[in-house]
Image (spheres, rainbow, N blue to C red):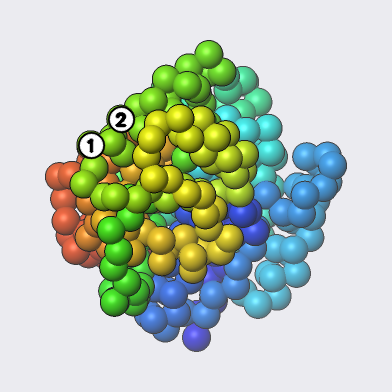
Amino acid sequence: MKLICVINRYNDPNYGDIGICRSITHFLEDNGYTVKNFDFIGRRLKFQFTRTIHILSKIYAARKEKPECLLVGGGQLLLNNRNFPYALLGWYLVSKISGIPLVAYSVGGEISEKQGRFYRWVLRLFLSQAKTVYLRDDITVKLVSQLVGFHFETVPDAVYLSYQHIDVSGLECSDTVVFVSTNSVPKQEVHAHYNRILAVCGQAASSRVKISVSSEQDIKAAERFYDYAQQSGIDISIEPAQSFEQFIRQISAAKLVISSRMHPLIYAHLLGKPFVAIPTNNKTQSMSEFLLKKSPENLADEAKKKLLIALK
């Protein structure tokens, strides 16, 4: 069988990234491919250079297996993060030197103000080396166009590849589930953000509210929100998801999903659950508006077709 090396942040404690990696892996395996996963950034080493060397060493070992391509799939791979440019450079060098085709599928980004010349240079190298590039949303299309002048086609988020694979039937309750994040929220606006969430909770018909997270980095924010919400008079509890499976069960069992993060909204849409976005950035706002316009079936069909086209 043909081998695909899938590159994603699957070691991160972020259930959106984990879901992306699983969705891509399962879909490829269902279509006759063998999949080997690599972490996009590599080990949590102290220096970016050593991370790049680690990535190179892992892939050069994989070269002997002659993969069909390096599939960089999903997630915030074009975000302004000090680790990402070095990871992009590493995968670019692997593809360029070894001759393994590079495919970027459903990659996303959201910030354009802080990228420096080095990031722009690396991003241009990476995108020019890729055989196929599909971006995840219009925000990323605009970002890439501003940074490097390239314009690429969009494809639905990679988690839609798992449509019909997630079986959580029989889970129903009357809870509103809130996925809290204060990512990108200035300190002076945090309480206003909390009040927006509480206002939506108060309008919901659910008698109980459960606080969860889609990433371990949001646990402290969830705890602070729980403390703040005690004065609201709402029947509220906190139960941060501790695994991807629990994250999916919480959404499937919810009567309503309220989220400051993007992937709880996407999974709510995929599982047919009502959702309300309390965005902290343009990405979440744009995605929530987009999801209201299309069915999960149509998005799944589009995602599957374009991935198979990218691999030809």
Q: Are marks 2 and 1 in contact (CB under 8 Å)?
A: yes
Q: Is residue 66 left or right of residue 272?
A: right
Residue at 28% over, 58% down: 174
Above or below, 114 against 254 in this view is above
For the question of whether residue 249 can be seen, the reply is: yes
184 or 229, which is in the foreground? 229
Q: Quadrant of residue 114?
A: top right
Does the image show residue 69?
no
Q: Nearer the viewer, residue 146 or 268?
A: 268
Question: Residue 78 in the image: x percent, y percent?
Answer: 52, 38
Q: Which residue is mark 1?
A: 203
Secondary structure beneath disc 2?
helix
Q: Dot 2: few (<14), some (14–19), or many (≥20) neighbours within 10 Å?
A: few
Identity of the residue furthest to the bottom in this view: 1
Residue type, numbered disc 2 = Ala
- Residue 4, given in percent of the width and then of the height, sits at 53, 71
**Which residue is at a point 38% across and 35% down the rendered structure image?**
233
Quadrant position of residue 187: top right
Q: Amino acid at mark 1?
A: Gln
Q: Which residue is mark 2?
A: 199
Please state if 203 lies on the left or on the right of 248 as rendered.
left
Please say if 231 is above or below 27: above
Residue closer to the observer: 286 or 68: 286
Quarter holding the C terminus is bottom left
Total residue callouts: 2
Residue 132 numbered tag: none
Q: Residue at x 49, y 68 (%)?
A: 245
For the residue labelled by badge 1, is the local secondary structure a helix, a strand or a loop?
Answer: helix
Disc 1 crowd, CA 10 A, few/some/many (<14, 14-19, 20+): few
